[in-house]
Amino acid sequence: MTTPRWSNHCSRHLMHNPKQLLPVAVSASKSLERSLRAIVNGLDIAGGALYLVDRNNELKRIVASANYPEPLPNEAYLLEMVAADQIELIADAHAHPKLCEHPWVCESPRWRSLAVAPLKLARAQAPFGYLLIADDQPQRFDASTQTVLEDVAHLVTERLELQLSQAEVAGEMDRMITIGILAAGVAHEINNPLSFVGGNLQFALRLLDSEFDRDDLPSAVSESLSDINEALRDALEGSRRVRNVVRDLRRLAGGNGTDDYTIEPVDVLESLKSSLSIARKHIEQRAKLVEQLTHTPMVMGNDSKLGQVFLNLLINAAQAIPRDNTGDNEVRVRTYERDGDVVISITDTGTGITEEALEHIFTPFFTTKPTNEGTGLGLAISHNIVRNLSGDIEVETALDEGTTFRVVLPSVDKVVQQMPRT
């Protein structure tokens, strides 16, 4: 394999200043394999490997290697020596009482000095892998090597965590698109038979009203017809409610679930009402729902995306309230104008948010909910949607008192006034 030119450059200088230049070389590389080769070349050592471990802290697979022996030996004895958050430096493996039990180490002239650094994601309690470097000379690794390994392990972990986060975000977005498509499909399938049901109910009601003169009928028959009429009207009202649910599903799904995020004038009150109709039952299981909704100016936005934001905030407000004492808690929803902006305020009387958590609530994958109740993406996605519409989400909270989220969006008039004039 031809050594990249930047690796040769780093190799010449790392012997003099490894702490500063090696992390730069690792950051510049495009793969873990090149990162590891930069380490080996930069420190002028025999070789190294980057490998993953399973939940039992047992070797799972090599993900990168440089001058490392194949086939790979069993390295459980090394893993046993490494603490979860500590870099292990071994001055001379041949003189180590435990390592010398393994012929692979003692019989190999290449493996004298060893250094093992754990790789640990911020969200995990245990390492997911280890970075191992080795040399054929004893006493090669000292405190400066440990500092370099700390920096490099941090860079490698950051890269892997970024890749993992991107994969999870992509998966979550795929899931949301799929839900949108399914919702639109279900809405279509329900709408067709619902149209027949509603039409036939209306026909039956008209028939009862026009074909029968109840004054000429016996009282028992007239009462039965009245009961039938009432039952049909109840059924018609039920079908209208189903139609409204279908309408809200289609609105949330963005029509066919694959809209291209069209920006246009939107009535936030209509989007909010659709989200309220979906979240209402969930909220009323924990609190009273208080609506203080007034008509506001139109905003530039996307109906389905704003509905997604409102629904997420409403569900979060409900989940912040314990299930007991429903009568003593409330979720209050308000709409109003403020300095040319439209404000949608959602207040709960829940547990509040700690100061530490408040700093991270819009960070992807950060959540204070139990494991099975949240992905930590809802607020991050909502914040991104609102910011892309030149708006903002404000938060006020007090522990054991509750939290207010305010979605602030510029009105259409304000957007027009702020446009550059030609």
Image (spheres, rainbow, N blue to C red):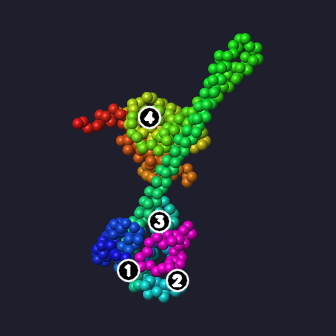
Residue 237 visible, this angle: no
Query: Disc 1 marks which amino acid?
Result: Ile
Q: CA distance from mark 4 to mark 2?
A: 69 Å
Pick whichever, 173 or 125, lies toward us: 173
- Residue 234 coordinates in the image, percent (x, y): 64, 27
Q: CA distance from mark 3 to mark 2?
A: 25 Å
Give residue 268's mark: 4
Does residue 353 sit above or below 233 in this rendering? Answer: below
The answer to which of marks 3 and 4 sits earlier in the sequence is 3
**Magenta part of the chain:** 51-80
Residue occupied by mark 1: 45
Residue occupied by mark 3: 120
Does residue 344 sit above or below 141 in this rendering? Answer: above
Q: Please tell me whether mark 3 or mark 4 is closer to you in this view.
A: 4
- Residue 50 coordinates in the image, percent (x, y): 45, 72
Secondary structure under the numbered disc 3 in the rendered image: loop
Q: Is residue 228 magenta?
A: no
Q: Is residue 59 magenta?
A: yes
- Residue 81 coordinates in the image, percent (x, y): 51, 76
| Residue at x-position 70% and y-position 14% | 214
Quarter of the image with the N terminus in it: bottom left
Query: Disc 4 marks which amino acid?
Result: Val
Q: Is residue 238 left or right of residue 67?
A: right
Crowd class of label 1 (few under 14; some 14 to 19; many from 20; radius 10 Å): some
Residue 228 visible, this angle: yes
Quarter of the image with the C terminus in it: top left
